[in-house]
């Protein structure tokens, strides 16, 4: 009997981590600090929820099948938004709306790869990307990051084979939070172009980048659509995680192939979610700017308060957007440490072993902290608890 597609990969890491909470109680004076998942815990703003409710009650079309690649109004609005953000010209024909950014990645891979193909991915990697590659029969070829948590073009080029079809980057990065510099992203574009590969850049956390300027110049490159595929998510920006709405910006030719996948899997993206995303693009620029500044303030608190952990042998490898990637000082693996922290410190976080290939020793020494849902006082409490851990 052959192996199934799903059994070719590991269990969902966040769900596995939540099982560590079973049977564990946390006293009222020391509630659980959950830094395991990069998802807003607050609902959308009331005005957006009112707009969604109004659509559900008054627009019959939101309850019907819609276009496979998304409503024309949302595609146009996102094209205009991206054109402004990246100082370029993008049209609705370049845009597809998806049921979340994970589906965007899955659809792109389906359009690019077949069984036995390979995609280059910096490590530590985003585990859902790795899971989809496993289930697609596509080899995930790791590009180890340097001490600054950034991959190098030279390391990537050394791993290109006749089976390589794409390079996949995430910036700002999940799990490390690091923002790849514009010149590094452009160098990867040129590498992909040189070898006839696609460059997939997942920019789920784009709206929380420390610079308000365009994070890269890929859309300004001649014939960018022959190489570059951009992924985006409305979930983090507008607190729409439960409504699953993401996007792809690519050439119309690529979207033609992607449409086949999307039609087969979901037929169309959620209509009310698209209505919400459109409302957000049209109404929430100032609010999103405030949210960005708050997230940046929390990232600053992560960096500036780290001395209390550094004194105990911890090392902050990187921090930005929603994440901090920390090297712990203990002899045991992070796979053992993370469950212990639930019981001993009231902290739920993910071990580095969930973000690297089996056997990669760097995973055992690191933890990912998804800090975006902690305010500055909460970050101080997190550090206080971690500094008290003694093993």
Image (cartoon, rainbow, N blue to C red):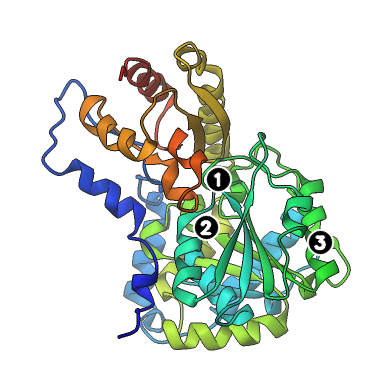
The image quadrant where one finds the C terminus is: top left
**Depth check, front residue: 129 or 281:** 129
- Asked if residue 104 is positioned above or below residue 317 in the image, the reply reads below
Give the number of the disc on residue 383: none
N-terminal of the pair, mark 2 or mark 3, is 3
Is residue 370 visible in the rendered image? The answer is no
- Give the mark toward the camera: 2 or 3: 3
> Residue at (36%, 42%) from the top-left corner?
36
- Contact between marks 2 and 3 (CB within 8 A): the answer is no
N-terminal of the pair, mark 3 or mark 1, is 3
| Dot 2: element | helix
In this figure, which residue is indicated by the disc labeled 1?
A: 288
> Residue at (44%, 64%) from the top-left corner?
131
| Dot 1: element | helix
Q: Horizontally, is 182 left or right of 45 in the view? A: right
In this figure, which residue is indicated by the disc labeled 3?
A: 191
- Asked if residue 251 is positioned above or below residue 156 in the image, the reply reads below
- Determine the CA span between mark 3 and mark 1: 34 Å
Q: Position of residue 212 (x, y in %)?
A: 71, 41
| Residue 160 in which image quadrant | bottom right
Q: Position of residue 316 (x, y in %)?
A: 54, 26
């Amino acid at each position: 009997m052959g192996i199934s597609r799903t059994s070719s990969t590991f269990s969902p890491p966040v769900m596995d981590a939540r099982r560590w909470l079973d049977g564990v109680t946390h006293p009222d004076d020391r509630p659980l600090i959950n830094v395991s998942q990069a998802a807003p815990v607050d609902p959308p703003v009331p005005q957006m929820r009112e707009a969604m409710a109004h659509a559900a009650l008054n627009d019959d079309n939101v309850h019907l099948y819609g276009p496979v690649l998304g409503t024309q109004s949302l595609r146009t609005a996102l094209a205009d938004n991206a054109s402004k953000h990246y100082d370029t010209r993008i049209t609705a024909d370049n845009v597809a709306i998806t049921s979340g950014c994970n589906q965007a990645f899955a659809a792109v891979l389906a359009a690019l790869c077949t069984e036995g193909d390979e995609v280059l991915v910096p490590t530590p990697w985003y585990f859902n990307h790795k899971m989809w590659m496993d289930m697609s029969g596509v080899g995930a070829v790791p590009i180890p990051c340097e001490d600054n948590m950034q991959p190098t073009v030279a390391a990537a080029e050394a791993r290109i084979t006749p089976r390589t079809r794409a390079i996949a980057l995430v910036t700002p990065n999940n799990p490390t939070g690091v923002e790849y510099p514009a010149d590094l992203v452009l160098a990867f574009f040129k590498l992909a172009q040189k070898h006839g590969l696609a460059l997939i850049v997942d920019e789920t956390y784009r709206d929380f980048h420390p610079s308000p300027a365009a994070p890269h110049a890929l859309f300004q490159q001649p014939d960018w659509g022959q190489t570059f595929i951009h992924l985006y998510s409305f979930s983090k920006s507008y607190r729409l995680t439960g409504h699953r709405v993401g996007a792809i910006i690519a050439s119309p030719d690529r979207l033609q192939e992607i449409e086949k996948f999307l039609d087969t899997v979901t037929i169309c993206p959620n209509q009310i979610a698209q209505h919400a995303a459109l409302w957000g693009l049209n109404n929430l620029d100032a609010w999103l700017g405030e949210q960005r500044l708050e997230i940046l303030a929390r990232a600053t608190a992560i960096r500036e308060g780290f001395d209390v952990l550094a004194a105990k042998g911890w090392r902050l490898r990187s921090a930005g957007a929603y994440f901090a990637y920390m090297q712990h000082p203990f002899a045991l693996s992070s796979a053992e440490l993370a469950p212990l922290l639930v019981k001993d410190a009231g902290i739920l976080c993910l071990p580095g072993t969930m973000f690297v290939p089996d056997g990669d020793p760097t995973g055992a020494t690191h933890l990912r902290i998804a800090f975006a849902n902690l305010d500055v006082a909460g970050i101080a409490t997190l550090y206080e608890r971690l500094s008290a851990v003694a093993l």
